[in-house]
Amino acid sequence: MKLVVQEFLTLDGVSQGPGAPDEDTSDGFTRGGWFVPHLDAAFEQVAGDWLGEADAFLLGRRTYENFARDWPRMTDHPFAPVLNGLPKYVASDTLTEAGATWDPTTILTGDVPARVADLKRRPGRDLQVHGSARLAQSLLAAGLVDELRLAIAPVVLGEGRRLFPDGGAPTGLRLTSHRTTPAGVSIHIFTTTGSPDYGTYGGGA
């Protein structure tokens, strides 16, 4: 399977709490819900197309618990059959089997990068990471991410947890496609290329 990370970002790189004010208030974050004003039919179509490429989902504990609370009740949403029906894998050393109520769910503990590498060797299409920024960071550092799909909203927050924090793993990327929705969301799709090229500028004086 191909490991794909899908993230909502602000222009200043914040990935925390895009969907609702109370989605993620950790570290005193109070500016959640910033992506919602920029949703439109064009982006819904893109998101639906991405979901249609999934064979399984890989989530961090916080994202899993939010999804497991909400999606089983949203049976009339067109995304619900895919999200509710496909296998979910959760990277967590604290979530118990009793807490993994969103079937079918498998908890990955211990050496998560090794467990994810095993999943990638299975036949299939996308193993998709939605949100779960800390997990995404660790997978990038381990060199396991094949593709990044970034949906960048036209907003600057000035605070919040960033997808690419200072001290993160250097990663080379190649842009494969991009578009902008009528509501102003800039969608960029990258494949990873390993370590970045630190070549010097070759222009003239």
Image (cartoon, grey):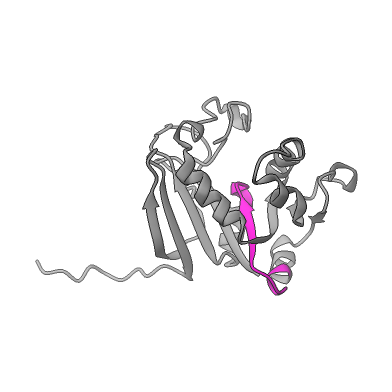
The stretch of residues the image draws in magenta is 119-135
Tell which of 133 and 198 is nearer to you. Answer: 133
State the quadrant of the C terminus.
bottom left
Residue drawn at the location 60% of the way across and 66% of the way down: 144
Frontmost residue, 126 versus 204 = 126
Which quarter of the rendered picture does the N terminus lie within?
A: bottom right
Q: Position of residue 57 (x, y in %)?
A: 69, 56
Whether residue 173 sits left or right of residue 119 in the image: it is left
Q: Is residue 7 magenta?
A: no
Farthest residue, direction right: 98
Q: Which of the 4 image quarters holds residue 30?
A: top right
Q: Give percent across and percent down for residue 96.
A: 86, 46
Q: Which residue appears at 41% of the width and 43% of the height? A: 185
Q: Position of residue 99 (x, y in %)?
A: 85, 42
Identify whether 116 is placed above or below 183: below
Vertical arrangement, residue 85 with respect to residue 18, above or below: below
Q: Is residue 137 in view? A: no
| Residue 135 visible in the snapshot | yes
Image location (x, y in percent) of residue 83? 70, 49
Position of 195 relative to 79 (above/below): below
Say if the magenta span includes residue 128: yes
Question: At x 46% / y 69%, what residue is drawn?
Answer: 195
Numbered label tally = 0
